[in-house]
Image (tube, rainbow, N blue to C red):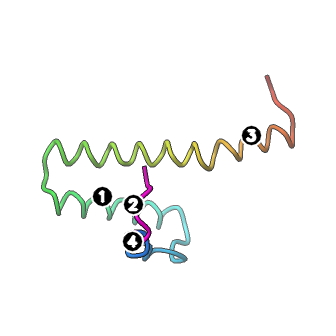
Amino acid sequence: MPYIPQERRDALDLANDVIRSSGELNYLISKLCKEYVRMFGMSYKTLNEVIGVLECAKTEFYRRVVEPYENKKIVDNGDIY
């Protein structure tokens, strides 16, 4: 979960308003993952942690952003089921 103390959020919120494309988003995510591996060492444990974090971030994004958007579109446009 991305729920960390506010003071750590403030320190990590350096990328606000700088990402201008999906390519830049991908670059930033990839660079962060690469840096994490550099800091904690190339090992199965570290690689597994990165993959786990990416999967959890994806799931959390879907749960908090995509699903409410899709539910609104069902109301706006009608359901197909």
Helix, strand or loop for disc 1: helix
Q: Residue at x 79, y 43 (%)?
A: 73
Asked whether 3 falls inside the magenta stretch, the response is yes
The amino acid pointed to by label 1 is Cys
2 and 4 marks in contact (CB < 8 Å): no
Quarter of the rendering occupied by the C terminus: top right
- Number of residues whose C-alpha sits closer than 10 Å to that of mark 3, classed few (under 14), some (14–19) or many (20 or more): few
Which residue is under mark 2? Answer: 29
- Number of residues whose C-alpha sits closer than 10 Å to that of mark 4, classed few (under 14), some (14–19) or many (20 or more): few
- Stretch of the chain drawn in magenta: 1-8
- Number of residues whose C-alpha sits closer than 10 Å to that of mark 1, classed few (under 14), some (14–19) or many (20 or more): some
Q: Horizontal placement of 29 versus 18: left or right? A: left
Q: Horizontal placement of 38 versus 58: left or right? A: left
Q: Residue furthest top?
A: 81
The amino acid pointed to by label 4 is Leu
In front: mark 1 or mark 3?
Answer: 3
Helix, strand or loop for disc 2: helix
In front: mark 2 or mark 4?
Answer: 4
Residue 34 at x, y percent in the picture? 26, 60
Which sits in the foreground, 32 or 1? 1
Asked whether 51 falls inside the magenta stretch, the response is no
